[in-house]
């Protein structure tokens, strides 16, 4: 009997977790929201609005089970992005990030996006395998990062969001067509209620 109760409890937990994920995703701007196509502005003042936004973004990213998030995805056009290298790793927050150099080697891999069907759409994107970034912390301290592998990919995905670029712009025409078809609202079946 205890085993069954335990099972029910864990199912309830999963349901709660899923409900929280959906609630977080409802706050993430979805394609074709025009804000996702706009260029974000440099942050000038490193005040509490920056640290507050980073806190809010971190909460949403974790609840939505994302690995990265950019401010425009919350409708805020400021050059701020966050990510985690792994679930247990601390959040990295980059303000006004700029690419110093990129590796010549490129690699193709599948990517999803919280703003494209809550990551149900997956397309192949080719990106440099490593890059060097300079940015500021939310407190205005200089940050220098040499990233490779998944970290390099996540940073480039989020950097794109700061310039209004989406993964459907970086994939093949065939995959772009398939992704857009998947995102199109489903036809309503006759008059219901
Ligand atoms: Zn994205």
Image (cartoon, rainbow, N blue to C red):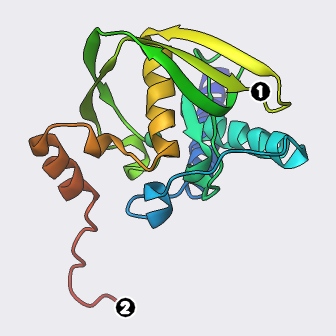
Residue drawn at the location 21% of the way across and 37% of the way down:
171
Residue 89 visible in rendering: no
**Left or right of 172: which side holds 36?**
right
Quadrant of the rendering where the C terminus is positioned: bottom left
Position above or below: 112 against 145: below
Please identify the quarter of the rendering in which residue 45 is found: top right
Which label lies toward us, 2 or 1? 1
Q: Residue furthest left?
A: 174
Where's residue 163, x and y in %? Answer: 47, 46
Q: Residues within 10 Å of mark 1 (few under 14, many from 20)?
A: some
* Secondary structure category for the residue under label 2: loop
Q: Residue at 61% of width from left, 30% of height from top? A: 97
Circle 1 sits in a helix, a strand or a loop, which is it? loop
Name the residue that disc number 1 marks. Answer: 137
Checking the image for residue 61, the label placed there is: none
Cα–Cα gap, marks 2 and 1: 52 Å
* Residue 150, percent from left and from top: 45, 15
Quickly name the residue at label 2.
193
Asked whether residue 82 appears in the rendered view, the answer is yes
Of residues 61 and 77, the one nearer the viewer is 77
> Of all residues shown, which one is farthest toward the right?
48
Residue at image coords 67%, 25%: 135
Q: Is residue 136 above or below residue 31?
A: above
Q: Is residue 22 above or below residue 134?
A: below
Please report whichever mark, 2 or 1, sits nearer to the chain's N-terminal start.
1
Whole-percent x, y for residue 127 in the image: 32, 22
**Crowding at label 2, few (<14), some or many (≥20) Cα neighbours within 10 Å?**
few
Q: Examine the image and state in which quarter residue 107 appears.
A: top left
Quadrant of residue 142 within the rendered picture: top right
Picture quarter with ligand 1: top left
Expressed as whole percent of the image width and height from the top left, the position of residue 165 reads 39, 46
């Amino acid at each position: 009997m205890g085993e069954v109760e335990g099972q029910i409890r864990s199912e309830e937990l999963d349901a709660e977790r899923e409900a929280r994920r959906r609630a977080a995703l409802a706050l993430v701007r979805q394609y074709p929201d025009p804000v996702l196509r706009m260029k974000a502005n440099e942050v000038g003042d490193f005040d509490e609005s920056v640290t507050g936004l980073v806190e809010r973004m971190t909460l949403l990213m974790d609840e939505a089970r994302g690995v990265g998030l950019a401010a425009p995805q919350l409708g805020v056009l400021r050059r701020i992005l966050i990510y985690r290298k792994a679930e247990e790793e601390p959040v990295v927050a980059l303000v006004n990030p700029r690419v110093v150099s990129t590796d010549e080697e490129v690699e193709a891999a599948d990517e999803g996006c919280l703003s494209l069907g809550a990551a149900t759409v997956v397309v192949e994107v080719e990106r440099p395998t490593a890059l060097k970034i300079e940015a500021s912390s939310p407190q205005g301290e200089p940050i220098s990062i040499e990233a490779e592998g998944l970290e390099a990919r996540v940073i480039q995905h989020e950097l794109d969001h700061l310039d209004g670029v989406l993964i459907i712009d970086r994939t093949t025409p065939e995959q772009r067509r398939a992704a857009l078809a998947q995102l199109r609202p489903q036809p309503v079946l006759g008059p219901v209620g």
